[in-house]
């Protein structure tokens, strides 16, 4: 699915640093989502966006900031990274809300030392 | 918030046999139940979903059943093949509430040739 991409694919950072994970989709989907995947927890929704300039918290939003100035981009920022934010992060997009198919990006593996 | 429990966490079957994965949810208002498949190192992909106004849905070798009274739903895979080996995630969402998608913790299915 080349329609949704994430960068970087791998990132190592240190505690306290700011990190931004990028997500870009070419389908013009109105909805975009950020999840984190951890062993024993499955996938957990961090934030989602219904359209440009509209964002909403998910299940685990603390420590994260999102913005959506353009429909195709949905960056996720960790303002001050902590070790507990070590995870695999997936971006997804869809034509409708959470109750419809979501198309996932390839993921970003983030390690916070 | 919603609590989705998924069992078993691992499942091994012989090629050609059937596999069943079960999930329970806590929020009686939940009304959309997707199943995602994630192959090793890959992104999750939707394989089937069901809405609360339907009790069963089939797509070739895959079927999902929903029991709203008991608040559980199941994934059935018949005539399993080695390419069915993956981690499967169930999820649920309450469209009338916070609209968040909550995932189970996943089932690692191994199909033995």
Image: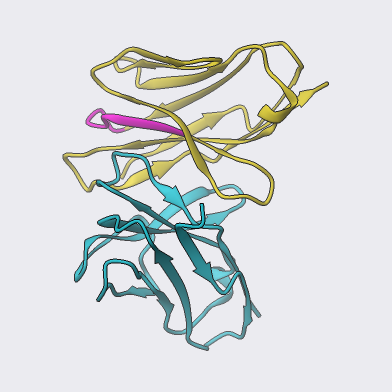
Chain colours: A cyan, B yellow
Q: Residue furthest bottom?
A: A17
Locate residue B64 relative to residue A37 in the image: left or right: left
If the image is split into quadrants, where does the C terminus of chain A sit? bottom right
Determine if the magenta segment contains residue B1: no
Magenta region, residue range? B27-35
Residue B42 appears at what percent x and percent y?
A: 62, 50
Q: Up-down: is B30 above or below B61? A: below
User: Which residue is pictured at 47% across the width and 20% down the height?
Assistant: B74
Res A57 quadrant in image: bottom left
User: Which residue is pictured at 26% across the width and 29% down the height?
Assistant: B31
Q: Nearer the viewer, residue B3 or A49?
A: A49
Res A64 quadrant in image: bottom left
Residue B77 appears at what percent x and percent y?
A: 58, 17
Q: Nearer the viewer, residue B70 or A72?
A: A72
Determine if the magenta segment contains residue B32: yes
User: Which residue is pictured at 29% across the width and 75% down the height?
Assistant: A67
């Amino acid at each position: 699915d080349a329609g949704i991409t994430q960068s970087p694919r791998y990132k190592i950072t240190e505690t306290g640093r700011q990190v931004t994970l990028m997500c870009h989709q070419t389908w013009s989907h109105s909805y975009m989502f950020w999840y984190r995947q951890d062993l024993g927890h499955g996938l957990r929704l961090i934030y989602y966006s219904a359209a440009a300039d509209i964002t909403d918290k998910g299940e685990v939003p603390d420590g994260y900031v999102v913005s959506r100035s353009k429909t195709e981009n949905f960056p996720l920022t960790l303002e001050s990274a902590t070790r507990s934010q070590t995870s695999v992060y997936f971006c997804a997009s869809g034509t409708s809300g959470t109750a419809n198919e979501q198309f996932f990006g390839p993921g970003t593996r983030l390690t916070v030392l | 918030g919603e609590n989705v429990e998924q069992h078993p966490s691992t499942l091994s079957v012989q090629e050609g046999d059937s596999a069943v994965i079960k999930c329970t949810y806590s929020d009686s208002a939940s009304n959309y139940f997707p199943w995602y498949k994630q192959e090793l190192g890959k992104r999750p992909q939707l394989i089937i979903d069901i809405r609360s106004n339907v009790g069963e849905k089939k797509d070739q070798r895959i079927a999902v059943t929903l029991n709203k009274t008991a608040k559980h739903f199941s994934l059935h895979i018949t005539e399993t093949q080695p390419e069915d080996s993956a981690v499967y995630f169930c999820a649920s969402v309450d469209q009338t509430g916070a609209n968040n998608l909550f995932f189970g913790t996943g089932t690692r299915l191994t199909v033995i040739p």
